[in-house]
Image: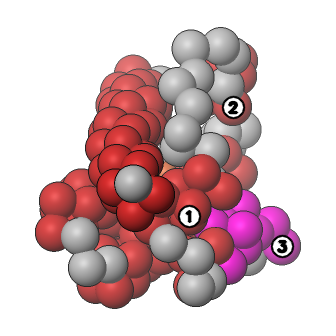
Amino acid sequence: MTKTPTFIPLLNSVSRAETAAGEAFAEWARTTTDKRLAKTLRVVAMRETEHGIAFAKRMLEFDCELYDDGRDFTAELRKIVASKRSDVNKMKALGFNKSDSGPDIFDRFFRDKTIDPMTGALIGRYICEERDTGRLLKAQHDRLHTADKKRKERANR
Ligand SMILES: [Fe+2]
């Protein structure tokens, strides 16, 4: 039997985090009253959920099952999404008000030089979708922030 790949823990933590994030974004999409934001959140939720499944599927192709690694990457996300903050304040709290061109957590994903082409393609697509999601959410933040500012200006007149 072939040895278990060294990148299985990476696939496992991505799968678990994405599945949990998918649920949180879907919940946010259901509860916001802003239709345009809801649409973006649904795209994000579908992406996250699909990443969760795709990474679990890849693990299974290596004969590995998902396992609890004791890590919770989405506790903060779930807490903020479930809070009573406005949409724009949720986005700020989650950092979607900043466009990030600097280093990010994904930069070290390919440090493992044993990653095979198929897994590499999956990880590459995942990273690019995550960064695109960041851009989509930043655009929604900016739209809501501008609308908020105009509303406040009108109220102060
Ligand atoms: Fe994600």
Numbered range of the magenta stretch: 69-79
Mark 1 against mark 3, which lies toward the viewer? 1
Is residue 41 visible in the rendered image? The answer is: yes
Q: CA distance from mark 2 to mark 3?
A: 19 Å
Asked where in the image residue 39 lies, by quadrant, the reply is bottom left
Is residue 110 visible in the rendered image? The answer is: no
Q: Who's the residue at 53% across and 43% down the image?
A: 96
Q: Give the x, y percent position of residue 129.
A: 34, 36
On residue 121, the disc is: none
Q: Residues within 10 Å of mark 2 (few under 14, many from 20)?
A: few
Q: Who's the residue at 60% across and 51% down the image?
A: 92
Residue picked out by circle 1: 90
Is tag 2's residue or tag 1's residue first in the polypeptide sequence?
1
Amino acid type at circle 2 is Ile
Asked where in the image residue 85 lies, by quadrant, the reply is bottom right
Amino acid type at circle 1 is Lys
Q: Is residue 115 left or right of residue 26?
A: right
Q: Residues within 10 Å of mark 1 (few under 14, many from 20)?
A: many
Q: Who's the residue at 39% across and 54% down the image?
A: 157
Which of the pair 141/66 is nearer the observer? 141
Q: CA distance from mark 1 to mark 3?
A: 26 Å
Amino acid type at circle 3 is Gly
Q: State if disc 1 and disc 2 touch (CB < 8 Å).
A: no
Q: CA distance from mark 2 to mark 1?
A: 21 Å
Mark 2 against mark 3, which lies toward the viewer? 2
On residue 70, the disc is: 3
Residue picked out by circle 2: 105
